[in-house]
Structure formats: C-alpha cells, structure tokens
Amino acid sequence: MIQLVRGFKDILPPETAVWRHVENTAREHFEKFGFREMRPPVLEQTALFQRSIGEHTDIVEKEMYTFAGSRDTMLTLRPEATASVVRAYIQHKLYAADPVCKFYTIGPMFRRERPQKGRYRQFHQINAEVFGIDSPYIDVQLIFMLMTYFSRLSVTGLSVHLNSLGCPECRPAYRQKLSEMLSDRTGDLCEDCVRRLEKNPLRVLDCKKEPCRNAVSDAPSMLDFLCGDCRSHFRAVQAALDAIDIPYEIDPRLVRGLDYYTRTAFEIQTEELGAQNAVAGGGRYDNLVEMLGGPSQPAIGFAIGADRLVELVETKIPAPEPGPVIFLAPMGEAAMELAAKWACLLSDAGVRTEADFSGRSLKALMRRADRLGAENVLIVGDREIEQNEAILRNMKTRDQKSLPMDRLVESVLEHEG
Ligand code: ATP
Ligand code: MG
C-alpha cells in the first residue's frame, strides 16, 4: 500500500470542522479590521525567497522544496507567504491607488524540516500583512487583532513576546558586538551556530539547542543599541499596548527566522504545546518592498501556525459532527427508488439527508440511523406505498407520524421548517 509522505498529513473529518471554524473566524475577524483576502500561488521563483528570507537562513539553506522549471528558472514551493504577498503588491502596483493595503492569506507552506510533533513539512499559515503605514499604532492594532482572534477561538494561556530588531542604521553595531562576544565561545556552540556566527550571528540567538541557549544567555541586547527613531518607535508600541491592556514580555533574545524583519518583532507562545510553543510570529519589514524592486513602503505582518492553533482549539471545542436530519430507510426495490429521489430533493432543499440502499432489515437500518445520530428516520416499504403514507419517526421522542407520499418532500419541509 502506498503511504502518506513523511512529514505530511491528512486532515480528516471531524477535524476538518475545526479547521473551517479557525479559518472562517479569521476571515470574519480580520475583515472587520479592514483586511482583504489575497490568494497567491504556492509556487514562486526560488530567487524571490533567496532575496527576501535571506541566503543565510535555515529555510533557504536547507529547507526549501526546489526544482528546475522551464528554461533556467528554479522554482520553489513557498516556505512562507509574506514574500509572495509583497511580490504581488509590487507586480500588480497595488500601491498605486493607495499605498495603505491590508491583506490576509490562508494556505499551506512547505519546509523540509525534521518532522516531529507540531512540525510538519506541509503546514498551514494564516497571514496578515499591512503595507504603507510606519506608525507604531498599526503594530499594536495588528497584535490586538491577533490576540482578540485567539480569544474568539477560546484559546487562552498565550503570551506576547516582544522585541525590536532595530534597522540598518543601528543593527550593524549590535551585530558586530554580538559576533565578537560569540567568537570567544565557538567551543560551546553547535555546528550550525558556528556557521551562523560567520554569516548571520543574530541567528544564533534563535537556536533551540541547550548549549547554544546557554552561550547566549548573557549576550548583549539589541535594545541597548537602538537608534533614536527605533527607540521611540519601540517605546510607542509598548505605551499603546499598555493603553489597550495587552500584556507582553520584552524578550531581547527574540529574533525571527527570516532576515527581512526590522524594528518590532513578536511571537505568541503557548504553554500547552511543549517544545513547539510558538503559535504565531510576526514583525515589521520596512525595507522588503523596496528590496524586491517596489517603492519604498513600510510594512508589518504576522503568520499564525494553523496546525498548532487547531490543536489548541480542539481541546476547547470538540468538532461538531451533526447527524442527518432525515435518514431514509427504504424496504424493497420500489421504496428504494422513491427514497433515492427524495434523498436528492431533500438535500437540495437544504435538509441534511442520508439514505440507506443496503436492502438490510429495518432493525439494521435503525441501528445505523442511531449510530449516525439521525434526528428522524423516514420508513417506507411496500405496505406504506400501498397506503400512500410514509412513516416519520423522531429518534429522540420516538413519536411517529404519517406523511402523505405524493407530497413527501413538501411535508418533510413543513415538518422541519
Ligand atoms: P519555529 O520557531 O517553531 O520554528 P518559525 O520561527 O520557523 O517557528 P515562522 O516562520 O515565523 O516560524 O512561522 C510562523 C508560525 O508558523 C510559527 O509560529 C509556527 O506556529 C508555524 N510553523 C512554522 N514552521 C512550522 C512547521 N514546520 N510545522 C508546523 N507549524 C510551523
Ligand atoms: Mg522554524
């Protein structure tokens, strides 16, 4: 038997209902904040991710699903959504009418990571991106929208972790300082971090391995290096979060796995999922639009890990699996022919209907109706056909009612309406 590819998963009912709930709630909630849905493709030119995420990141160095396209272009299954949204914003000149644009996207991402609990090779993100606003108030609005979204889903026990990554003005000095400090400790770092140290020392702060975490525990903080503008931006974000009663923790070690971030960076963590505790991450990327060939427009966004979110929601709201409103139990060939037609017409009229064509005994059919959680069973056999009356039995109250067969669909609709 051919099995599922490792690191991939099937999302099956009844879990699908939780996914739909999570996605529909995002749509409804985000649209109230002025976001519109964009659906970029899952395939892009590899260069897009190399240039945006950065050459010296785990994602680009070793996690992308890349293959040759036509001619000389290399193609990659998207490992994240922001790059595509930025590409679309530039390519379709979405900034022309008004540079302020707010988009959300929902869909699968692909990273060849080591599969483990909460970490898949195809996973799903719900993203939101805002272009054209550099005010710290939009940072806070975005975090507010994210946290109230989680509340709507009754997910609790989340905390906001906040940092500022500075800008190209102030980050180089910090990078230099960090790099100097870590150079003395290469013996304590993992192989990956020794390499990171050379190309991208900030990434060492993000390593999840214990020895590396210890090695950076007393590392200098970016916050001590912020330039005046970055510092006042960060202060304003904190004041506005306080004003709207969103608690947060400042975490000077928080960096993100992608190079394009500037200033505000944040992560939403849960206590409930063990090692894979980040449910969402985001931040500003004020230079990315220009870096990818667009106009100079600031931007900020976040990505929610939908797989992890669904896990949290599932423990709160078990997936509702409603049974059929009408379960048709026909006995005999003639009854089955009638039931086939009624099942079609009733479903089309909006009544959840299931018909059993197995030809088994009434007792067997009743058992199945019960198992499916049917609200009513409609019984029809030769005797009922002769008397032109089908029997509608309510499975809860056990009440029975005769319905005229020539007006069967209408009668059921009146009864259920
Ligand atoms: P992590 O620190 O868990 O590796 P990340 O920093 O790589 O996360 P982002 O690229 O910021 O994650 O993506 C945002 C969110 O997407 C994460 O917070 C997480 O919930 C989710 N996510 C990322 N990678 C995976 C994966 N391989 N499987 C499932 N969810 C993932
Ligand atoms: Mg990661």
Image: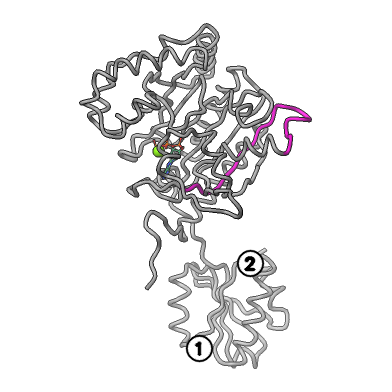
Pointer 1 residue? 359
Residue at the far right in the pictured view = 97
Q: Nearer the viewer, residue 291 or 368?
A: 291
What colour scheme governs how the chains and residues are painted in the rendered image of this protein? one colour
Horizontally, is 43 left or right of 413 in the view? left
Mark drawn on residue 265: none
Q: Residue at x 68, y 69 (%)?
A: 348
Q: CA distance from mark 2 to mark 1?
A: 23 Å
Image position of 183 with respect to 27: above or below: above
Of the pair 258 and 265, the residue shown nearer to us:
258
x, y percent for residue 41? 61, 49
Residue 108 belongs to the span the image colors magenta: yes
Drawn side of residue 266 relative to residue 392, left or right: left
Q: Ligand 1 falls in which quarter?
A: top left
For the residue marked with disc 2, what is the amino acid? Val
Amino acid type at mark 1? Gly
Q: Are marks 2 and 1 in contact (CB under 8 Å)?
A: no
Eyeballing the image, is 331 above or below 312? below
Q: What range is drawn magenta here?
A: 92-110
Which structural element holds mark 1? Answer: loop
Q: Which mark is residue 351?
A: 2
Q: Position of residue 94 (x, y in %)?
A: 73, 34
- Of the 4 image quadrants, the one containing the C terminus is bottom right
Q: Nearer the viewer, residue 128 or 366?
A: 128
Identity of the residue furthest to the left in this view: 187
Q: Is residue 31 above or below residue 251?
A: below
Circle 1 residues within 10 Å: few <14, some 14–19, many ≥20: some
